Image (cartoon, helix red, strand yellow):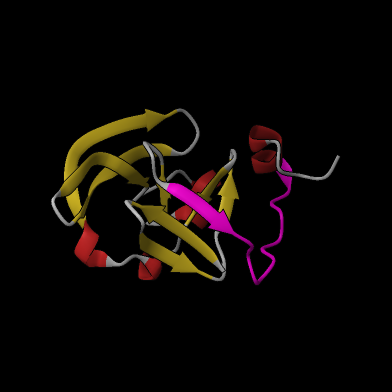
Amino acid sequence: MMRAIWNDTVIAESPTTVRVEGNHYFPPESLRREHFSDSTGKTLCPWKGLASYYTITVGDSVNPSAAWYYPHPSPLARRITNHVAFWNGVRVEGTPEKTVKKPGGLLARLTGTGRR
């Protein structure tokens, strides 16, 4: 089971994540939504597209824009549509219970996740 933890609280938990560029992207249904609120931040990845952000709140502690997702990623990144990745002190730990096939073709070359 994979878990995203911040302030000693599990904020997302899933048996499967999608790993891209060293980040675990959690399925949207795995989020504990009470800890997430929309953030105004946006960034642009040249191959994944426009990322949106969530602010994480646990108790009285707030972690602005600590989670990101791609609501409308490029065709190359469609596997992570609405999946959420973390940074800024959020710890991701565990072992996936299911294996997700590694991407092939152009996506594998761009992300370095394919077979060599």
- What secondary structure characterizes most of the magenta part? loop
Of the 4 image quadrants, the one containing the N terminus is bottom right
Residue displayed at 50% across by 51% down: 92
In percent of width and height, residue 35 lies at: 23, 59
The answer to whether residue 79 is magenta is: no
Residue displayed at 55% across by 60% down: 17
Question: Is residue 116 or residue 74 the one in the foreground?
Answer: 116
Question: Is residue 89 or residue 52 the one in the foreground?
Answer: 89
The answer to whether residue 103 is magenta is: yes
**Residue farthest to the right?**
116
Residue displayed at 56% across by 71% down: 15
Q: Judge whether residue 74 can be spotted in this image.
A: yes
Q: Judge whether residue 78 can be spotted in this image.
A: no
Question: Is residue 45 or residue 75 the one in the foreground?
Answer: 45
Q: Is residue 56 above or below residue 40?
A: below
**Residue farthest to the left?**
60
Q: Find residue 39 and report its image quarter.
A: top left
What's the magenta region?
91-105
- Compared across the picture, whether 97 is left or right of 54 comes to right
- Compared across the picture, whether 99 is left or right of 7 comes to right
Question: Is residue 110 or residue 84 the one in the foreground?
Answer: 84
In percent of width and height, residue 84 lies at: 40, 53
- Compared across the picture, whether 42 is left or right of 109 comes to left
Residue displayed at 66% across by 63% down: 100
Q: Find residue 93 and report its image quarter.
A: bottom right
